[in-house]
Amino acid sequence: MKEKVSAMLSVFSAPGEYRGSRKNIMKKKILVITGSPRRHGNSWAMTDAFIETAEANGHSITRFDVGLSKIGGCVACEKCFSKENQACVYNDDFNKIAPFIQEADAVVFSTPLYWYSFPGQIKNFIDKIYSFVVGQKDIAGKACGLMACCEDHDISALDGIRFPYEKTIGLLKWESVGEVLIPGVFHKGEINATDGLQRASALADAL
């Protein structure tokens, strides 16, 4: 089943390498968070490739296109979960996603690089994950993965996404099981000339 909200954090090895047998895959609830406000761009294509393979393997996928959402920035009020069934006291789209974060077995982020960091929309989402810390909600032990791309041909440009991703999941006690980082793509479709879609699919296969 695929739940997608469009208006609005895997085990990965090199392509062709998998850990274990597909017949023995444990079915998971996977939450996919996209950060691009540009529909059907390069990071969206990686997302679609990942989801297609994950669904074919029997996993349950919930997708939130955070880049198209309305999520305000964290104001550090420390009132998280003080209202019943609300992670954030400011009732924006983050509260629609929060229950899926709690229920997910795995969280996968897919995003482009904007000015050497996360796009603002997904950064607001990541900041609000802090609500689970303040609210003392146990969301430790999840698997997670990252797919990211950028126009810059120097892959180190993606450090602005990779570093905060790795520090965030370390704090949350999530296990990063893969990063797919693709430099040198900007115009829609340029991802097709790279191994990005194959690696996104392999990321799903290896979950």
Image (cartoon, rainbow, N blue to C red):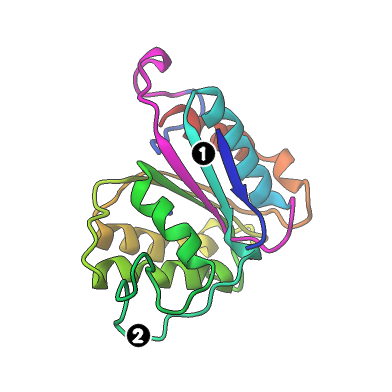
Residue designated by label 1: 61
Instruction: Examine the rendering and report whether any part of residue 119 can be seen.
Output: no
Q: Give the x, y percent position of residue 146.
A: 47, 50
| Category of crowding for the residue at label 2, using alpha-carbon neighbours closer than 10 angstroms: few (below 14), some (14–19), many (at least 20) | few
* Residue appearing at x 42%, y 38% in the figure: 29
Question: Which disc number belongs to residue 110?
Answer: none
Residue designated by label 2: 76
**Residue 28 on the magenta segment:** yes
Separation of residues labelled 2 and 1 (CA atoms): 31 Å
Q: Look at label 2 and name its amino acid.
A: Ala
Instruction: Examine the rendering and report whether any part of residue 92 can be seen.
Output: yes
Image quarter in which the C terminus is found: top left
Magenta region, residue range: 17-40
* Residue appearing at x 46%, y 79% in the figure: 90
Could you tell me what secondary structure mostly forms the magenta stretch?
Answer: loop
Above or below residue 167? Residue 146 is above
Between 187 and 8, the one nearer to me in the picture: 8
- SS assignment at label 2: loop
* Residue appearing at x 32%, y 57% in the figure: 169
Above or below residue 206? Residue 154 is below
Quarter occupied by residue 6: bottom right
Between 22 and 2, the one nearer to me in the picture: 2
